[in-house]
Image (cartoon, rainbow, N blue to C red):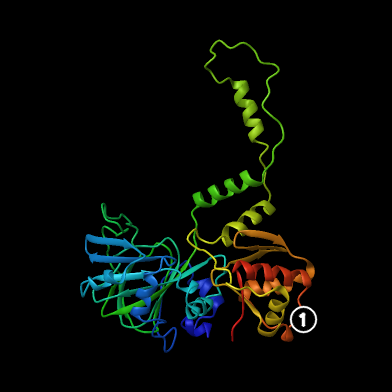
């Protein structure tokens, strides 16, 4: 199935020859695919305050950007052309979207971001732009014309609410229909315009900047690092200028700061917590009437368990990270936890060895927090 998704390429060959290197057009990547939801269902999602959505109108150098949640009347006032509705993290609210995203698990979960859907009327677009991350653009219903360019001129327009390229010079062009997909590496300029009413499903990936990672790591050190000692100057001498910071003071401060050290283990701990941390707008809904531990275990043994679509479970060695929290697994817990992290679900206990008591208790805690669910067929 993955070779069809990648135009006949194996995942290893795709990663070697295409990923992060060159665009790739894949005709009929998902045979029979015509989208996952109707425009009406998409508008309903855009009216929810727990779903991130945007409405983009315009073309050329004139653009308008509005953020949801929207009201039903907002859609009634729209023109017949040149507007696009985008709904982010569709995989958090639609099981079919979560299943579609799972087809891209040849990319590490730590890099996978979310599935966004855009609905556009004829002429609808978000303008010529570039992304700083890899993206797969899977066409649902209708048709969209894509132009791409590997240009190095990435200057953007001033005084517009979107990052629109000032001078877009297309090099290649295709019209994508249902099931077709276009892969683009970072910084490849692209411009998609709806030929007719259409939907496009964007599989995006996380690519934090060096500054974001450095800031996050320094915050992590601030929370975890403990340095002994205090500034002291028993050999202090009279200064000609009281307002001057002396060389001796600077040297001592430099030496104190030089005590800051970190290891690969510290980096792994930070990475696990940082990369599993949900976005600020993500909230979990605990079950309204949670099962008691014994009843939960019985149901989990019968049906299996699955991570909530919003949950992120990652691991490095025997250290596991879920939704920004960390714990060390015991030897008898590791295999099940790795399977849950890789496949995002565990089969019923009747098909697998019984889980350790401590892990069953941990799963029940996650269930009560809304992080884990009883699996459904």
- For the C terminus, the image quarter is bottom right
Q: Farthest residue toward the bottom? A: 32
The residue lying at 26 percent from left, 57 percent from top is 166
Helix, strand or loop at disc 1? loop
- The residue wearing badge 1 is 353
Residue shown at the point (36%, 65%) measured from the top left: 69
Residue 116, by quadrant, is bottom left
Binning the other alpha carbons within 10 Å of mark 1 as few (below 14), some (14 to 19) or many (20 upward) gives: few
Pick whichever, 346 or 295, lies toward us.
Answer: 295
Left or right for 309, reference 301? left
Residue, far front: 289
176 w.r.t. 278: above or below: below
Which of 10 and 44 lies nearest the eye of the viewer? 44
Q: Nearer the viewer, residue 219 or 316?
A: 219
Q: Residue at x 50, y 63 (%)?
A: 282
Q: Locate residue 222, reporting x and y percent.
A: 62, 43
In screen coordinates, is 362 left or right of 8?
Answer: right
Spot occupied by residue 231 in the image (x, y as percentages of width and height): 66, 26
Q: Position of residue 47 (x, y in %)?
A: 37, 69
Q: At 66% from the left edge and 55% from the top edge, which residue is drawn? A: 269
Number of marks in picture = 1
């Amino acid at each position: 199935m993955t070779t069809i998704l990648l135009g006949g390429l194996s995942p290893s060959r795709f990663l070697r020859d295409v990923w992060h290197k060159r665009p790739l057009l894949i005709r009929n990547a998902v045979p029979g695919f015509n989208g996952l939801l109707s425009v009406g269902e998409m508008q309903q999602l855009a009216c929810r305050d727990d779903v991130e959505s945007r409405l983009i109108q315009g073309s050329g150098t004139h653009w308008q950007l509005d953020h949801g949640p929207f009201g039903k009347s907002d859609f009634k006032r729209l023109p017949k052309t040149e507007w696009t509705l985008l709904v982010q993290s569709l995989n958090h609210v639609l099981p079919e979207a979560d299943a579609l995203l799972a087809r891209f698990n040849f990319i590490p979960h730590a890099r996978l971001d979310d599935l966004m859907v855009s609905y556009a009327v004829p002429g609808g677009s978000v303008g010529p732009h570039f992304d700083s991350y890899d993206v797969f653009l899977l066409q649902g219903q209708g048709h969209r014309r894509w132009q791409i360019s590997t240009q190095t001129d990435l200057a953007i327009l001033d005084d517009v609410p979107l990052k629109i390229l000032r001078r877009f010079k297309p090099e290649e062009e295709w019209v994508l229909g249902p099931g077709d997909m276009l892969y683009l590496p970072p910084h490849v300029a692209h411009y998609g315009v709806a030929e007719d009413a259409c939907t496009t499903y964007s599989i995006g990936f996380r690519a934090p900047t060096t500054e974001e990672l450095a800031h996050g790591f320094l915050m992590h050190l601030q929370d975890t690092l403990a340095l002994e000692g205090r500034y002291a100057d028993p050999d202090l001498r009279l200064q000609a200028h009281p307002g001057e910071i002396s060389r001796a003071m600077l040297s001592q401060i430099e030496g104190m700061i030089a005590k800051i050290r970190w290891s690969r283990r510290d980096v792994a701990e930070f990475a696990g917590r940082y990369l599993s941390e949900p976005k600020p707008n993500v909230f979990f809904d605990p079950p309204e009437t949670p099962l008691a531990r014994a009843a939960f275990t019985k149901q989990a043994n019968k049906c299996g368990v699955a991570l909530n679509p919003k949950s992120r479970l990652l691991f490095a060695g025997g250290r596991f990270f879920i939704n920004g929290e960390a714990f060390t697994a015991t030897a008898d817990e590791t295999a099940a936890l790795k399977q849950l992290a890789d496949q995002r679900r565990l089969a019923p206990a009747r098909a697998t060895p019984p889980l350790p008591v401590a892990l069953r208790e941990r799963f029940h805690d996650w269930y009560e927090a809304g992080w884990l669910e009883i699996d459904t067929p």
